[in-house]
Image: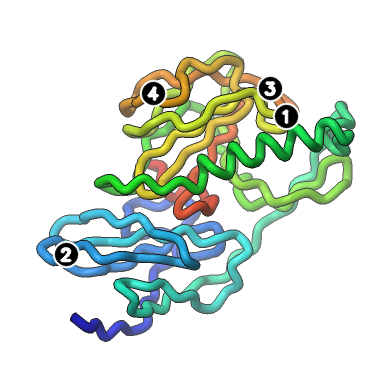
Amino acid sequence: MTRAWLLVILLALSDAATSADAVPNRPGGIAIIDIGGVDEPRPVVEYDGRPVLVYAHGSRRKAAIGLPLETEPGTVTVNVDGEPVVVAVESHAYREQRLTVTNQSYVTPDPAQLERIGRERTIIDTAINNFRDTDVDGITLAPPVAGPRSSSFGLRRFFNDQPRSPHKGMDIAATEDTPITAPRRGIVTATGDYFFNGNTIIVDHGQGLVTLYCHLSEIAVAEGDTVESGDLLGAVGSTGRVTGPHLHFGVYLNGTAVDPAIVLPN
């Protein structure tokens, strides 16, 4: 069936969304589009050549598209069974963050460290970009740890006055060894002690919804483990490039880092 798709304008709300259908369609945000009824065959949805998460919401099907931080305000095109859907993208200004790191190697790594970073980046990218085709009942997540949540996602960071890539996660303040729990069912796809991230866990929740946990003091799961919502993953720490104990919590859709505040409860 040929669909006549009109411009889809999605409501841009506050940094913390109150439902899966009310989320900011801004760079680093999530666009939600209606793609038909649940009684119709599930369409194939792609954005920028990548498969997109599709889930049922009542009697309708929705697609949740992660919008990269570098997306320019204006419009983007999503393909639904090969038909274009044009989605409006709002502008959004992110702040700067300047940090002092005492260990200079975390600012200017030596050649051996750069080689290690490259190996670890391959592992992380593979896990983040994985698309496991399974039914997913939405995109909301339970908080992985209790504590004050920073609005640090998207910050343009400077370490010792040297510019680095924007911050692609949420920092949640908590004391050393505070338990970290799974925010929903998933499969552990990577664990390790990485140069920048310290002790790290990556969990695949299906259809490209992936969560990342960094700087842990300990890891309580192994690659290949299936976890349920509330299961212990590890504990808050200060490993890797940090200025103190906290959890760096990352959320990814279609291989794209999105603001975790959108999918967490207020």
Q: Nearer the viewer, mark 3 or mark 4?
A: 4
Tell me the residue that label 4 is attached to: 225
User: Disc 4 and disc 1: Cα gap in Å?
Assistant: 23 Å
The residue located at (59%, 22%) in the rendering is 216
Tell me the residue that label 3 is attached to: 239
User: Disc 2 and disc 4: Cα gap in Å?
Assistant: 32 Å
User: How packed is label 4: few (under 14 Cα within 10 Å), some, or many (20 or more)?
Assistant: few
User: As shown in the figure, which amino acid type bears the numbered disc 4?
Assistant: Asp
The residue located at (30%, 65%) in the rendering is 44
**Measured from the top left, where is residue 12 in percent x and y?**
45, 65
Q: On residue 195, which mark appears?
A: 1
User: Disc 3 and disc 4: Cα gap in Å?
Assistant: 23 Å
User: Disc 3 and disc 2: Cα gap in Å?
Assistant: 47 Å
User: As shown in the figure, which amino acid type bears the numbered disc 1?
Assistant: Phe
Seen from the viewer's position, the closer of residues 12 and 234 is: 234
Label 4 residue SS = loop
Circles 3 and 4, Cβ within 8 Å, touching? The answer is no
User: As shown in the figure, which amino acid type bears the numbered disc 3?
Assistant: Thr
Circles 4 and 1, Cβ within 8 Å, touching? The answer is no
User: As shown in the figure, which amino acid type bears the numbered disc 2?
Assistant: Pro
